[in-house]
Image: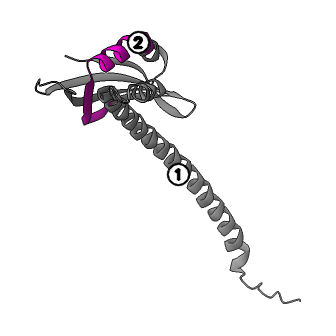
Amino acid sequence: MAVRTARPFRPLRIIGPALVVLIAALLGAAFWIGGDLREAQTAADDRGAAVRAAGAHAVDLLSVSHQSVDADVKRILDTSTGPARVEYTGNLAKLKETTVKNKVVQTGALRASGLVSLKGNTARVMVVGDAVIRWEGSKSAPQERFYRWNMEMTKVEGVWLVSKAELVL
């Protein structure tokens, strides 16, 4: 009668494949979580970029001088698109004429801005700013004016531009 000897226990036969499955599952989870984090970071970047662009546009609208009116208008047009750009282009001649004729020096400041909504390539941003207006050579006291806008932002080729700017009363 032959004596059977017990086979030695080999834990690597079981542990090896289990470790491979575990590592594969962990890598899959890491890629999945990493994708979600990238998506979240992209959304956060878009929110911040839309708010910054709206604030910069507001300062451009509020900062116009008879000495630099062409460059000032160019900045306004460069940060706008769609209906806003059409509106600004339509008012361009009158703005330049009035600014130069009256020797206007208007200095704007951003007071606050915040995201209202973001859907795809469109964002709504509320912006608050004020301007001090003086007339060079005039004895008139400078005037301070306060503005609030609801701005619609559109992402065009990776850049947030103002497509609509509505004054809020």
- Looking at the figure, which quarter contains the N terminus? bottom right
Relative depth, front residue between 34 and 134: 134
Residue lying farthest to the front in this orientation: 137
Q: Quadrant of the C terminus?
A: top left
Counting from the top left corner in percent of width and height, residue 8 is at 74, 85
Give the residues drawn in magenta, as a range.
89-115
Looking at the picture, tell me which residue is in the foreground, 24 or 2. Answer: 24
Q: Residue at x 40, y 37 (%)?
A: 47
Q: Position of residue 23 (x, y in %)?
A: 63, 64
Can you identify the residue that label 2 sits on? 93
- The residue type indicated by label 2 comes to Ala
Percent from the top left, x then y, of residue 7? 77, 84
Q: Nearer the viewer, residue 12 or 141?
A: 141
Task: Tell me which residue sits at (66%, 60%) in the image.
Answer: 24
Q: Earlier in the sequence, mark 1 or mark 2?
A: 1
- Given residues 105 and 29, the one toward you in this image is 105
Q: CA distance from mark 1 to mark 2?
A: 54 Å
Q: For the point 46% across and 23% down, which residue is it?
A: 77
> From the viewer's perspective, is 27 left or right of 138?
right
Amino acid bearing label 1: Ile
Question: In the image, which disc is placed on residue 33?
Answer: 1
Give how far across and how far down residue 6 sits, in percent: 76, 86
Q: Residue at x 74, y 74 (%)?
A: 13
